[in-house]
Image: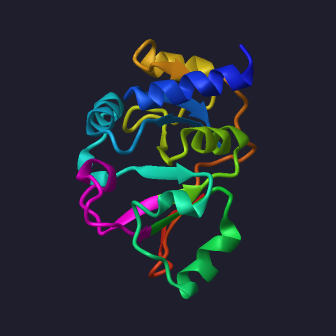
Amino acid sequence: MRITTQLEEAVAILKAGGLIAYPTESVFGLGCDPRNDAALQRLLQLKQRPAHKGLILIAAQLEQLTDYILPVNAELLARILPTWPGPYTWLLPVREQVSPLLRGTHPSLAVRLSAHPTCQALCQQFAHPIVSTSANPATQAPARDLERLTHYFADQIDLVLNLPLGQQAHPSEIRDAVTGQLIRAS
């Protein structure tokens, strides 16, 4: 199946409230439409991830995140923009209306402008950010190949984009944009 056809099918599934698996910079990710609480709940149950932890959003452009994060001042932009697009996730102040299934119990939301071409194409064609969480049940190693992804989730995902992963050895670094605190090293 051509990449364009796979991306079109992935976007249709996202719009219908489904779950997809796709390659990121380092591991396979699981994604859904962040505006769809039923899809978010299904994803959290599939991963066995507590909702209070929150999830990550990926986008193709910063403008795609404006419905989710508060306006970012020049100082914060100067900190985060040099790392994007790339494998750097930043915690930014979240808008009040963002679902607790997405933000968890936090006053911030984890966001990233991905450098991976598949992630960028998905967000561009979807015209919206998508959820990006590692494809693994809680406490298990993230899936870096189709065999492990299938072992974890078999037929519980609506579509798998079986395309190459990026070259990063570890999942994205996560930092708090306001404090600069390192939350997860890469």
* Residue 156 at x, y percent in the picture: 40, 17
- Residue drawn at the location 39% of the way across and 32% of the way down: 137
Q: Is residue 153 magenta?
A: no
Position of 89 compared to 54: left or right?
right
User: Which quadrant, please, contains the C terminus?
Assistant: bottom right
Q: Nearer the viewer, residue 69 or 157?
A: 69
Query: Residue 84's quadrant in the figure?
Result: bottom right
Q: Outermost residue, bottom direction? A: 75
- Residue drawn at the location 54% of the way across and 39% of the way down: 126
Q: Nearer the viewer, residue 95 or 51?
A: 95
Q: Height in image: 77 above or below 17?
A: below
* Residue 11 at x, y percent in the picture: 53, 30
Q: Is residue 109 magenta?
A: yes
Residue 173 in view (yes/no): no
Q: Height in image: 148 above or below 65?
A: above
Residue 76 in view (yes/no): yes
Q: Nearer the viewer, residue 122 or 75?
A: 122
User: Which quadrant, please, contains the N terminus?
Assistant: top right
Position of 95 compared to 4: left or right?
left
Q: Nearer the viewer, residue 55 or 144?
A: 55
* Residue 111 at x, y percent in the picture: 49, 59
Q: Which residues are magenta?
A: 92-110
- The way the protein has been coloured in the rendering is rainbow
- Residue drawn at the location 39% of the way across and 26% of the way down: 16
Marker count (numbered): 0
Position of 23 compared to 72: left or right?
right
Query: Residue 103's quadrant in the figure?
Result: bottom left
- Residue drawn at the location 47% of the way across and 36% of the way down: 31
Position of 101 compared to 3: left or right?
left
